[in-house]
Amino acid sequence: MSENRNHNTVRLAKMGMLVAIAIVLVYFIHFPIFPAVAFLEYDPADIPILMGTFAFGPVAGILLTVVTAVIQGVTVSAASGLYGIIMHIISTSTLVIVAGVIYQKHKTALIGLVCGVLAMTIVMIGANMIITPLFMGVPRNVVWQLMPFIAGFNAIKAGINGIVTFLLYKRISGFLHRN
């Protein structure tokens, strides 16, 4: 029992470290991809979240997402408020569930990441059509007119974070799996 408890404590500490890295990355790296929708900013927070997902599973990835989104949403990205927290949870949870389940079942990060990027892009089209008008007070047709930028933003952000995760995960996985 003591060994299992120690394992869980080490795992929790590593997950906390991944959240801290995600927050620090957002603090230092965030910029708009498309000037027309400057409020949509790229940030690399999903990289440590994806690494934690591959190391500890999709449920851990969702937990990492929620904790990171809340901390980020009340600190470094406080201007986006509850809207930003909700959208971050929806987008990154979609990414980590799809990528994490595929990785867990087939041990192929590349296919998991590609499918996760596609799923996140598609889900965020629907989420933006429903949630953005409620929080931003704009008609759906305005959101729809911005959809090429919104979909492009999500595909580019998830794609960059997926590529970086793919390039770094094998190098870092030894540390994440070691007790």
Image (cartoon, grey):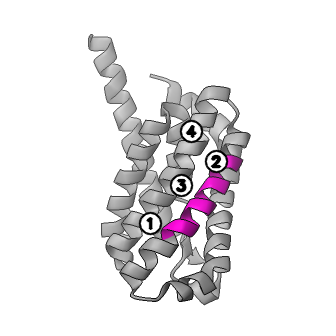
Secondary structure at badge 3 equals helix
Q: Amino acid at mark 1?
A: Met
Screen quadrant of the N terminus: top left
The CA distance from mark 2 to mark 3 is: 9 Å
Q: Is residue 25 left or right of residue 77?
A: right
CA gap between label 4 and label 1 equals 19 Å
Question: In the displayed structure, does residue 125 sit left or right of residue 84?
Answer: right
Residue visible at 63% across and 40% down in the picture: 169
Q: Amino acid at mark 3?
A: Asp
Marks 2 and 4, Cα distance to the nearest angstrom? 12 Å
Indicate which disc residue 46 carries.
3
Task: Give residue 119's position: percent from left, percent from top.
Answer: 62, 54
Separation of residues labelled 4 and 3 (CA atoms): 13 Å
What element does badge 1 sit on?
A: helix
Q: What's the distance in space between the residues labelled 1 and 3, CA to CA?
A: 13 Å
Q: Are marks 2 and 3 in contact (CB under 8 Å)?
A: yes
Q: Are marks 1 and 2 in contact (CB under 8 Å)?
A: no
List x then y, in percent, for residue 101.
Answer: 57, 35
Q: Earlier in the sequence, mark 1 or mark 3?
A: 3
Query: Residue at (67%, 55%) from the top-left corner?
Result: 118
Q: Of discs 2 and 4, which sits in the foreground?
A: 4
The circle on residue 100 is: 4
x and y percent of residue 104 in the render?
59, 29
Q: Residue at x 50, y 61 (%)?
A: 25
Q: Nearer the viewer, mark 1 or mark 3?
A: 1
Q: Which residue is denoted by mark 2 in the rendering?
A: 165
Question: Which is nearer the eye, 138 or 45?
Answer: 138
Amino acid type at mark 4:
Gly
Where does the magenta region start and end? 114-127
Please tell me whether mark 2 sits on a helix, a strand or a loop.
helix
Depth order, front residue of 59/138: 138
Residue 109 appears in the picture as rendered: yes
